[in-house]
Amino acid sequence: LDHRMGDNCSQSKCTRFHPFCTHCNDDGCMECEEGFNADDSLPEGSQCQPCHRFDPRCIHCNADECTLCVDLLLLSIHRSGGRLNDPPLTMDELTRELSITVPFGSTQEDAFYDA
């Protein structure tokens, strides 16, 4: 693996480009964690740009636009909470409620129809 180093390949060479860079070559970051896009034209340390710069709901983007939005409330429920690198939820997302009560861990599909 070109983007890993160390005796057991456990260390990433890509963190020099950005802490969220997951794949890189010698010239720059090629791929970032979900919610970020790689831009190797930027200086080392800032080559992963957040997709929420286009829209708070954007989870996949390129340098010019958001390519995929998600429902932040349902994404948080699916992941059991936000990650440290997720943008904070807006007030309307924080106060939004689903129309029916859903027990934790439910696979009841109709519970999310109105979300």
Image (tube, helix red, strand yellow):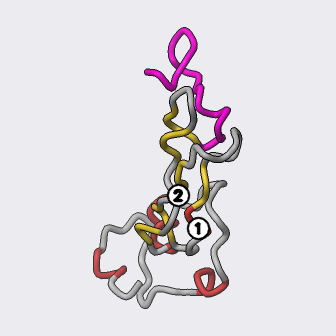
The residue that appears at 31% across and 68% down in the rendered structure is 107
* CA gap, disc 1 and disc 2: 7 Å
Q: Earlier in the sequence, mark 1 or mark 2?
A: 2
Q: Which residues are magenta?
A: 1-20
Q: Amino acid at mark 2?
A: Gly
Give residue 23's position: percent from left, percent from top.
49, 35
Q: Based on the displayed image, in which of its 4 quarters is residue 87 positioned?
A: bottom right
Give the answer, above or below, for where 7 lies relative to 27. above
Do callouts 1 and 2 mark residues in contact (Cβ within 8 Å)?
Answer: yes
Q: Residue at x 46, y 75 (%)?
A: 71
Q: Which mark is residue 35?
A: 2
Residue 73 at x, y percent in the picture? 51, 74
For the N terminus, give its image quadrant.
Answer: top left
* Residue most extreme to the front: 41
Task: Find numbered disc 1 in the image and state the secondary structure of the residue it sits on.
Answer: helix
- 97, 44: nearer the viewer: 44
Q: Position of residue 101 (x, y in %)?
A: 44, 83
